[in-house]
Amino acid sequence: MVNIIVVFRKLDDAKKIRSILQRHGFTVTACCSTGLQAIGLFDDLRNGIVICGYQMTDMLYTEIRENLPEDFQMLLMARENLLPQLVDNDLVCLPMPARAGDLVQTVAMMQNAVEIRIKKRKSRPKVRSKEDMEALSAAKALLMARNNMTEPEAHRYIQKTAMDTGTSLVETAQMVLDLFSL
């Protein structure tokens, strides 16, 4: 689920945006009137979209943007005369007042982009630490010595056992080492 935080100087404006989005099936995590409230939410949330106005009661949108975590995107809603000055690749802008359809389509597009980015990050192979690599190598060596396996067979055995037990390769390798050290 992609979190949506709505931040506007007037809390009523934020609630109106939330209402429009909820009517179209989006879940809005929070509505705020200060940038500090929004920034405080970032620690608890892994990803999301911040929809904000140009200026909140305590800061400009730029300060929120500087504190945006990697898996967040910002939708800036500002008067049309301000938008030409705000051209940036990482910033999505909508002129105020915005039509509900434009808002919904833009948020849907942004939500899709965040979800794709998260999927790509999850599909990247994880880098193992030196200790993890040593545990895997030691477990394979133990299986090769005790069970007359080749290195690929030992690796496949650890891999299959990990899948069958729902554990990681490193956890399975550690179990093999613990089992044979008894």
Image: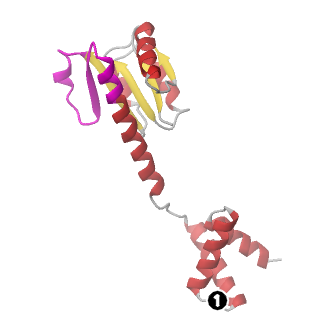
Q: Please name the residue shown 44% across and 7% down the image.
A: 12
- Which sits in the foreground, 61 or 91? 91
Residue 15, image x, y percentages: 46, 12
Q: Is residue 57 left or right of residue 181?
A: left
In the image, what residue type sits under mark 1? Met
Q: Please name the residue shown 52% across and 25% down the image.
A: 29
Q: Is residue 165 left or right of residue 20?
A: right
Label 1 crowd bin: few (<14), some (14–19), many (20+), radius 10 Å: some
Residue 123, image x, y percentages: 46, 57
Residue 33 colored in magenta in the image: no
Residue 82 colored in magenta in the image: yes
**Residue holding disc 1:** 149
Extreme residue toward the right, this view: 182
As helix, strand or loop, the secondary structure at mark 1 comes to loop
Q: Is residue 145 left or right of residue 93?
A: right
- The residue segment tinted magenta is 79-106
The answer to whether one can see residue 173 in this image is yes
In the rendered view, tell whether residue 36 sits above or below residue 109: above
Residue 182, image x, y percentages: 83, 77
